[in-house]
Structures are given as C-alpha cells and as structure tokens.
Image: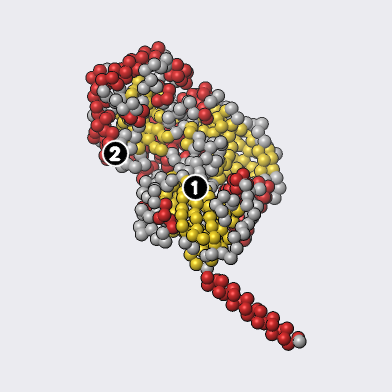
C-alpha cells in the first residue's frame, strides 16, 4: 500500500510539472480589440488620431523613438490614461510598455504606470504598478521596456494610468501577454473610483520618494553598503508613508558621516553659489564693487552621530548689509529634490542638524561704500566656522550709471495670476530689486477688442506699475486677428484707434511717457504671421507716427522681416545662433529664454549667463518666461499639476522668498554692469574676449567667478 501511495505521488507530481510546462508555453501575446487614450496624444510628430499604432505589433523604425510616426507622444499632461479592450476575457500574465528616454532632450521615462483590470469595463481592480526607474546614465538615449510580470488576473479590459516624469511621455507599443479565453470570468474585488484615485496618488508619492532617496544616496559620499541600501529602497513598498520615507532619509544621512572628517560641525565654502560647487575650504577673500551683491554658498555638515541645533553667529559685518538664506529643497519635475528655495534666516533662527545632515547656506553681502572687514560665521554652541575677508571698492556702478546703460529686463509678471494675489506690493519691490524694468500688460486687462470697456481693469492694474518702466501693451494676435475676423478692415481700424487713443491718455495720466509705451501685437511671431505684422505696423505708424512696436521672435531666420518694422525685437536664445544676429540701428535687440520645468533649470548656465550672452552679442535686454506661473496647488512641488511651474520665487505664507535661480539671474545682470565698466576702460574687444571665455565653457561656474574678480581687480587699480 505504501508503494502504491509513493507511485501515485510521483505520478501526480509529474502531471503537475507537465501541466505547469504546458501553461508556461501557452502564454502568448493577447489580441487587443480596441484602444482609447485620454488626453489625445499632442506631441508634434505623433499620429494623434491613430491610437492603434501602439497595439499593431510594430516598433518604431526611426533611430529616435519620438521622431517616428508610429509613436504616440504626450506633452505637458500630468496624467495619461490608456484604455485597452482585449478580444476575450483572458488570464493576463504580464504587460509591457515600450518607451524611451533622453534627459538631454527633456524626455524622461514615466514616473510610474498604474495597472487596473476589469471583466466588464466598469468595475476595476488594482493589478499592480510599474516603476519607471532606470539606472542608466542621464543624458543618454535609451529604449526601455517597462514590464510587470506575474499579474495573474482574469480581465477583458486594462486601464493604464501613466504619471509622466518631466513634460514628455512616448510609447510606440504596448503588449499584453497571457492565456486567451480564461476558464473563469471571476475578477478580483472591484474598487470604487475614489479608491482608484487614492491608489494612483499613493503609488505616485511612493515613487517620487524613492527617486529622492536614491538621489540622496548617490550624493551621500562613500557608503560601504550602498548597493544593499539601494536595493532595499527599490524594493520598499511603504515609501508613500512619510514616516518610512523620513526613516530612510535619516539612515542615509547617518551612513554618510565621513570617517576621515573632523567630528562635529564642519563648515565649507563652495566654489560657486549656483550649483553643486566643490568645497574650497574655510577661508575666502572677496572683492566686490559697492552697491552690488556678492553671493557665497556655504555647506554645513553635522559629522557626528547625534543631533545638533544652534543659531548662527555673524561678526565683522559693520557697514555691510548681510542677508542669510537657508537653501530649502523643492521637488522638480524630474523627481529630484534640489535646494532651490532661499528662506531668509536671522540670528534667532535655530538650525537643526540630524546626524550626517548637510545644509546649504547662501550669504548675500553688499556695501554702499568702500570698506574692509573680516567676517566670521559660526554656529552657536556647536563649534566650527569660517572666515571671509571682504573688501568693497567704488567702481562708479551706481543708480545713475545703471540707468545710463539702458539695459532692459523683462520676466512677464502678470499680476492677475493667482500667485500674485495679496503679494502685489512685495512682488513689485522684488522686481525692482532684481532690475526688472519692463511692465507687460496682458490682453485680458487691456481688452483691445472691447469698444465699450470703461478701462477700469487697466486703471486698477496700473497700481502695480513701477515708475520709469517700459510698458508693453500685449494685444495678442489670436484675439484681434481671429475674432471677430475683421482685422485691418476699416471698421476694425476705427475701433482700434479709439481704444488706442484712450489707452494712451490713461497711461499718460499715470505719468507714463510716450517714449516708454510699446504695442506688443505678436508674441513669438510665426512665419505665416509676418504679412499680418507688416500690414499692422505700417498702418499704425502712418496713423500714429510716435507709436512704437515690440515683438518676440522664435526663429532667427525671421529677423530680416521683423527688424525694419519693430522698435524692439526680443529673440529666443535656446533655438538660435546669436552670432548670426546683425543688430540694426533703427531697432533695439533683446534676448530671452523659456524656463520650461524651471526648478530643473540650471541657475548658472541658463539664468546667470543670460546677461553675459547679451553683452557678448550686443543685446540691450534680457528676460525669461516667467516670474510666476503656477500649475498645481503648490509652487514647491512640480508633480502636483499637469506641468512644471514657471516660477522665480516661492510663497512663504503671505510673503515671497527668492530661488537660487532668481538670485543667479540678478548676479548675471550685475556682471553685465561690470563688463560694461570694463569695456569703457579697456575697450569692447577686451571685454568681449573675457565674456567669451566664460560662455565657451558655460558649465564651469568657477570661470565666471574668476573673470568677475579679475575685472574688479583691474578696474580698481
């Protein structure tokens, strides 16, 4: 009897193994009957209406996935839904999404992809989550298959919820594999729509925290068990819980404590305030012009296994205005936590350091008169510190000199945006402190098509105007060309002149002179709009000889058509070769940048060097979009909206605080003042030669500091 039992057991085992093998072999690609996407694919090379491209079994032929017409691409959406209907109810084993990334092209893998399945297309269950994390080097093109195995559910309908990372998401194929014609129609327990959204939110938070921890781990220094710690983070399922997240943060900080450094609080001056500058020691000599700001970045590290707290102590700042900022982290669209928000702190502010924790402190020093001082900075009761030998020299860079340069700065601060509400006067002063002197009035305030307007919106808006600023009347071609469609007809011309004359009177009543008023009819003018631009400018200058026209230009090739007509033209820097621009005497040349995903934008190369480019290429103005445009509930987090915020400052209660990018932009303008002084004394060729050294190696932040100091030294002799 025992023998028969053993034989039966062996036969049963062999049968199960055989069945398992048959089952494994029967897994195949399942036929997808229908696919729908929401929102529609909107990337310029996508076949927007042909959703079936992503289930046709064909992969992109082009070497670059997003240049292929077989690819669907989405731009500037916070969440993408892909609904797939199978031919039959099937047993689903795995799902794969074919995509690609290249951070240099602003193309990232998605943050994550949530999987929900259903039998009837109405009641859904959660079937898993695909992480978009990839460990390959950044700024390299790579095709990636994001896959979820062992799903093992019965379903006919699959809903994929994609959370993009950055502004773009692409896929050229989605495959579902398993067994067709499932033996059962039973599905997992269905969830409510509210629960579905909670799962999406939870998985999103967990994945964001996972990326932040991995970035922190990479920058932590020599950690013996870094691979084990990373593997633990990648497999941790509870990272949506902030307590769990903070525990990992503390663990990484403690592991990062350097065994070679001195125990206690270590101070280190960084080589540049605008990025990941290298430590250069505890002493630094500073030479600065009076009336300009000198920025110093300091890294403070708690290199011991206990918590430390204390306030900072400043000595030797007599006759020097010193502002101290703590650089606080914000969350970028590429899942990084970067120290960008500059929170002002005082001598009464208590700074707390967990074991191994690092903080970046930014000092902004300015003197209105020549002075020498030795500045000592330390942390009360904690030890450590540093010394700054500060000297300011009078180079004649004062308000009158700055005004004589007629350098123009525009950051399009639209005071009607929600972020500005209740902060108007602070923002007005902040703009002035950062040399902004161009006041753009948006079309919804101007109401150029509303002949019956009482202009109260405009009159109220002018309370935000700073005396002496240029005024750009943004008409917006879309509004007055397409609706009501009678652009440049006699009826339209009559109406426009009535509106224009009334608007000019209102501006003059606010002490704004005609020489500071510009019509701004076309923003980022396109080639097809050139004839409309020409007809409008020719006509308005014949009717109102003193009228002036301003226009932004997307492509350098359009300048020959624009230059003869525009009094000011502002060219986008990121798509054009500035060396090809030939300024003309009759019009003024400015440049600007668009800071997409602004928190990810490099403060040095994109913000500070914008003014250096203006000097090198003879532009008399700079700007960027934008001072403050918010897309989510918080300007501190770029993952809470459909796209990254355009912001140069952050909210702090009812107040505003600057970003490192905004201060880098300010320093760049002050660099321009110094370059202009250098040009006056040593000639244009000598000054542009120095500027070119900085621009040629634009990723070397120390070069700008070196050239700035060199110019001050030579000017002060």
* Residue 680 seen anywhere in this rendered image of the structure: no
Residue receiving disc 1: 80
Quadrant location of the C terminus in the rendered image: top left
SS at circle 2: helix
- In the image, what residue occupies the spot 46% across and 57% down? 33
Place of residue 579 in the rendered image (x, y in percent of width and height, measured from the top left)? 29, 40
Quadrant location of the N terminus in the rendered image: bottom right
- Colouring used for the render: secondary structure
Vertical relation: 154 (above or below) 201: below
How many numbered marks have been drawn onto this rendered protein structure?
2
Place of residue 80 in the rendered image (x, y in percent of width and height, measured from the top left)? 49, 47
- In the image, what residue occupies the spot 36% across and 22% down? 449
- Of residues 453 and 632, the one drawn nearer to the viewer in this rendering: 453
Residue receiving disc 2: 556
Place of residue 44 in the rendered image (x, y in percent of width and height, measured from the top left)? 37, 46
- Quick check: marks 2 and 1 in contact, CB under 8 Å? no
21 vs 517, left or right, is right
* Residue 412 seen anywhere in this rendered image of the structure: yes
Label 2, label 1: how far apart the Cα atoms are: 35 Å
Quadrant location of residue 444? Answer: top left
Circle 2 or circle 1, nearest the eye: 1
SS at circle 1: strand
- In the image, what residue occupies the spot 69% across and 85% down? 7
Quadrant location of residue 558? Answer: top left
- In the image, what residue occupies the spot 63% across and 80% down? 14
């Amino acid at each position: 009897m025992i023998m028969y039992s053993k034989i039966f057991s062996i036969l049963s085992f062999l049968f199960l193994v055989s069945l398992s093998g048959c089952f494994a072999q029967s897994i195949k690609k399942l036929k997808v009957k229908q696919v729908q996407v929401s929102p529609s694919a909107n990337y310029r090379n996508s076949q927007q209406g042909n959703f079936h491209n992503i289930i046709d079994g064909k992969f992109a032929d082009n070497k670059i996935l997003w240049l292929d017409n077989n690819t669907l691409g989405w731009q500037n959406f916070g969440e993408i839904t892909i609904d797939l209907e199978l031919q039959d109810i099937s047993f689903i084993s795995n799902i794969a999404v074919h995509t690609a990334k290249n951070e240099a092209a602003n193309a990232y893998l998605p943050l994550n992809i949530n999987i929900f399945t259903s039998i009837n297309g109405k009641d859904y269950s959660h079937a898993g989550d695909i992480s978009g994390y990839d460990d390959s080097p950044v700024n390299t093109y790579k095709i990636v298959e994001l896959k979820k195995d062992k799903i093992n559910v019965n379903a006919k309908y699959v809903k994929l919820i994609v959370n993009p990372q950055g502004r773009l998401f692409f896929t050229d194929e989605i495959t579902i594999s398993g067994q067709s014609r499932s033996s059962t129609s039973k599905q997992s327990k269905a969830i409510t729509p509210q629960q579905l959204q909670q799962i999406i939110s939870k998985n999103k938070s967990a994945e964001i925290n996972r990326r932040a921890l991995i970035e922190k781990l990479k920058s932590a220094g020599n950690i013996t068990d870094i691979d084990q710690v990373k593997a633990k983070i990648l497999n941790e399922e509870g990272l949506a819980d902030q307590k769990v997240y903070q525990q990992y943060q503390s663990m990484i900080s403690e592991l990062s404590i350097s065994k070679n450094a001195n125990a206690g609080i270590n101070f280190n001056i960084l080589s540049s305030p605008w990025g990941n500058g290298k430590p250069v020691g505890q002493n630094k000599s500073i030479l600065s012009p009076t009336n300009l700001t000198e920025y110093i970045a300091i890294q403070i590290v708690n290199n011991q296994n206990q918590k430390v707290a204390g306030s900072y102590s400043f000595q030797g700042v007599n006759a020097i205005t010193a502002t101290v900022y703590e650089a606080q982290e914000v969350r970028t669209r590429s899942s990084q936590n970067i120290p960008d928000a500059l929170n002002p702190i005082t001598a009464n502010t208590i700074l707390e350091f967990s074991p191994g924790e690092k903080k970046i402190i930014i000092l902004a020093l300015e003197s209105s008169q020549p002075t020498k001082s030795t500045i000592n900075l330390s942390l009360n009761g904690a030890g450590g510190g540093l010394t700054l030998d500060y000297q300011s020299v009078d180079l004649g860079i004062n308000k009158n000199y700055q005004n004589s340069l007629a350098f123009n700065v525009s950051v399009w601060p639209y005071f009607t945006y929600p972020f500005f509400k209740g902060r108007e006067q602070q923002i007005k002063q902040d703009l002035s402190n950062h040399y902004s002197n161009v006041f753009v009035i948006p079309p919804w305030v101007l109401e150029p098509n509303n002949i019956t307007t009482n202009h109260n919106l405009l009159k109220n808006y002018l309370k935000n105007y700073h005396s002496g600023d240029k005024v750009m009347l943004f008409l917006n071609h879309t509004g007055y060309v397409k609706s009501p469609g009678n652009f440049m007809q006699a009826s339209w011309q009559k109406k426009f002149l009535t509106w224009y004359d009334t608007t000019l009177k209102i501006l003059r009543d606010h002490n704004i002179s005609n020489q500071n008023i510009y019509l701004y009819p076309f923003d980022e003018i396109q080639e097809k709009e050139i004839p409309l631009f020409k007809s409008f400018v020719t006509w308005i200058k014949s009717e109102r000889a003193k009228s002036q026209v301003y226009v932004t230009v997307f492509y350098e090739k359009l300048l020959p058509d624009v230059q003869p007509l525009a009094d000011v033209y502002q060219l986008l820097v990121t798509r054009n070769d500035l060396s090809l621009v030939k300024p003309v005497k009759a019009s003024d040349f400015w440049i600007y940048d668009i800071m997409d995903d602004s928190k990810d934008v490099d403060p040095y190369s994109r913000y500070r060097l914008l003014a250096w480019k203006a000097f090198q290429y003879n532009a008399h103005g700079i700007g960027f979009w934008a001072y403050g445009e918010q897309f989510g509930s918080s300007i501190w987090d770029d993952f809470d909206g459909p796209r990254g915020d355009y912001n140069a400052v952050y909210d702090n209660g009812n107040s505003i605080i600057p970003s490192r990018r905004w201060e880098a932009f300010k320093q760049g303008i002050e660099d321009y003042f110094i370059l202009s002084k250098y040009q006056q004394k040593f000639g244009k060729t000598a000054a542009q030669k120095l500027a070119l050294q900085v621009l040629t190696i634009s990723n070397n932040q120390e070069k700008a500091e070196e050239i700035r100091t060199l110019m001050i030294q030579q000017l002060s002799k």
